[in-house]
Image (spheres, rainbow, N blue to C red):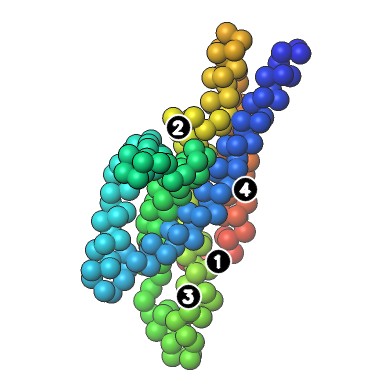
Amino acid sequence: MELFLEVTLKLLSGFGVTCKLFILTLVFSLPLGLLISFGTMSRFKPVSALFRVVVWIVRGVPLMLQVFIVFYVPGFVFGTPIAERFDAALIAFSLNYACYFSEIFRAGIQAVPRGQWEAGAVLGMTKAQVFSRVIFPQVVKRIVPPMGNEIITLVKDMALARVISVVEIIKKAEIILAENAIIWPLFYTAAFYLIFVGALTLLFGYIEKKQSYYKI
């Protein structure tokens, strides 16, 4: 029992790093994803083409490779890393998920009938007012399910930070394994993920239910 409690406390410290990385990734990737979606929908063709190419590249390259690129390539080019291990993982995750979120935002925005923009303009509303008061509430309704799926996937992708030795929960379990020659802590980490994902599933279910009053 004493060993179990000791292992649990150590894994909790690693899970704290996982949660910190997860929260910060959402803080940066969600607004960045919205901005990227505006870029891909730009009427200025060179801008939209540039953003679409960036999204295509980021979505097409494995996330683990992107983590390696952000952490190691600046060192090869400039002779010194430009980011700590945690920061490098945060940059890679934020850029990667911003591109995925951008496609969800783009699909949600384009699904709103064009006539609603025109109706808002007729009422004397600015484009910013139409978007914030009319379009965005409908976009939120549409994107909650796919966004929830991506965010739950992000939780599990956090484990990829271990490839550059960020001591998240899986890395912490590997350290315990090496120090004590016991493998069960590695499987024990599944309980932490299941609880976290379960909580997120309930949260997004609640959000969907709250949005159900708004019929599309």
Say what amino acid the circle numbered 2 marks.
Ile
The crowding category of the residue bearing disc 4, from other C-alpha atoms within 10 Å (few below 14, some 14 to 19, many at least 20), is few
- Residue 25 screen position, x and y as percent: 52, 48
State the CA–CA distance, disc 3 to disc 4.
25 Å
Say what amino acid the circle numbered 3 marks.
Phe
The residue indicated by pointer 2 is: 164
The residue indicated by pointer 4 is: 203
Local SS, label 4: helix
Q: Earlier in the sequence, mark 2 or mark 3?
A: 3
Q: Could you tell me if the residues under marks 3 and 4 are in contact, i.e. CB atoms within 8 Å? A: no
Quarter of image, res 50: bottom left
Local SS, label 1: loop
State the CA–CA distance, disc 2 to disc 3.
41 Å
Say what amino acid the circle numbered 4 marks.
Leu
Q: Earlier in the sequence, mark 1 or mark 3?
A: 3
State the CA–CA distance, disc 4 to disc 2.
31 Å
State the CA–CA distance, disc 4 to disc 1.
18 Å
The residue indicated by pointer 3 is: 131
Say what amino acid the circle numbered 1 marks.
Tyr
Q: Could you tell me if the residues under marks 2 and 3 are in contact, i.e. CB atoms within 8 Å? A: no
The residue indicated by pointer 1 is: 214
Q: Quadrant of the N terminus?
A: top right
Quarter of image, res 180: top right
Q: Nearer the viewer, residue 133 or 112?
A: 133
